[in-house]
Amino acid sequence: MEVAGFAKTSSAFFDIIAIEPDQPGVLGVQCARTDDAATRIAKIRSPKVWAKAERWLAAGNRISVMTWAMRKSDDKRRRWTLKVEAVRLEEET
């Protein structure tokens, strides 16, 4: 992912906000360990935060939960791996 700019944020549910070339709106990112992905998504969808997240998404912006885990690669080295999950207005079934 090429990022044109980013900033650390003090919002209730983003750790980072970023602008990506050729992508619409602003990307709000929640960062965590891979084990915590479901918890972070649940936090964003909680009644306390969801109204803000809905306004953010309705304005044409995006939300991603980016998580990392240490995994062994084919050459037996341990490497950090990234998993990205988008949060959308409608939950995918």
Image (tube, helix red, strand yellow):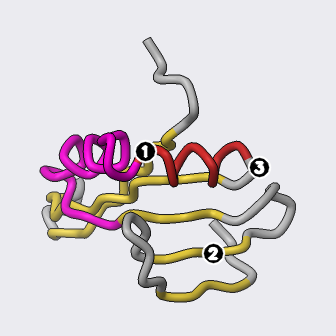
| Foreground residue among 35 and 55 | 55
| Foreground residue among 35 and 48 | 48
Under circle 2, the secondary element is strand
Disc 1 marks which amino acid?
Answer: Trp
Under circle 3, the secondary element is loop
Kindly report the distance in space between the C-alpha atoms of the residues bearing marks 3 and 1. 16 Å
Q: Nearer the viewer, mark 3 or mark 1?
A: 1
Disc 2 marks which amino acid?
Answer: Ala
The residue labelled by disc 1 is: 50
Displayed quadrant of residue 12: bottom left
Please report the residue visible at 68 percent of the width from the left and 76 percent of the height from the top: 3
Crowding at mark 3 (Cα within 10 Å: few <14, some 14-19, many 20+): few
44 falls in the magenta region: yes
Kindly report the distance in space between the C-alpha atoms of the residues bearing marks 3 and 2. 14 Å
Please report the residue visible at 38 percent of the width from the left and 64 percent of the height from the top: 13
Disc 3 marks which amino acid?
Answer: Gly
Instruction: Please determine whether, in this image, residue 16 is positioned above or below residue 54.
Output: below
Position of 41 compared to 64: left or right?
left
The residue labelled by disc 2 is: 18
Q: Nearer the viewer, mark 3 or mark 2?
A: 3
The residue labelled by disc 3 is: 60
Nearer the N terminus, badge 3 or badge 2? 2
Position of 38 compared to 56: left or right?
left
Please state the extent of the stretch shown in magenta in the rendering. Answer: 31-49
